[in-house]
Image (cartoon, grey):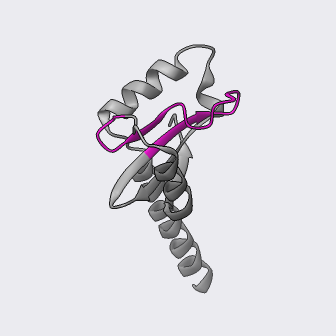
Amino acid sequence: MKNRILILLLLGLLMVTCKKEEAQTEFPVWLQTKIDEVTSNENMCDICHVTISEFEGKLYYNLYCDLWSCAYCHFYDEDGSAPDWDADKWNRYFADKKEVSTVPACP
């Protein structure tokens, strides 16, 4: 009986974990469009991910594929705009950002 309860608890935990992971991969429509554009060539899905961070009360999305030499070329605010920051603001971002999650770009 204890084994059955343990198995049910583990299955329940797996279900919750899977649902939580699915929720993390739901991107805004504008970001999904950019991901589709980037990953459509050369089957890049396996090597691309999105890092979501929070800074000054806003979410930021950094789309990055492992082959790229530019780490923040596809960096957007929550509205889909690339921030036009000076060096001081970038320094504050790197010092104060809170990384929310890093998830695969493709499900």
Residue 66: image quadrant is top right
Residue 69 magenta-highlighted = yes
Q: Nearer the viewer, residue 76 or 49?
A: 76
Q: Residue at x 58, y 35 (%)?
A: 64
Q: Nearer the viewer, residue 105 or 77?
A: 77
- Viewed as shown, does residue 30 lie left or right of 2? left
- Viewed as shown, does residue 12 lie left or right of 31? right
Query: Residue 91 appears at what percent x and percent y?
Result: 54, 54
Q: Nearer the viewer, residue 63 or 20?
A: 63
**Start-end of magenta stretch:** 61-81
Residue at the far top in the pictured view: 41
Query: Residue 1 appears at what percent x and percent y?
Result: 57, 84
Q: Residue at x 38, y 43 (%)?
A: 26
Badge count: 0
Above or below for 10 versus 100 = below
Can residue 62 be seen here? The reply is yes
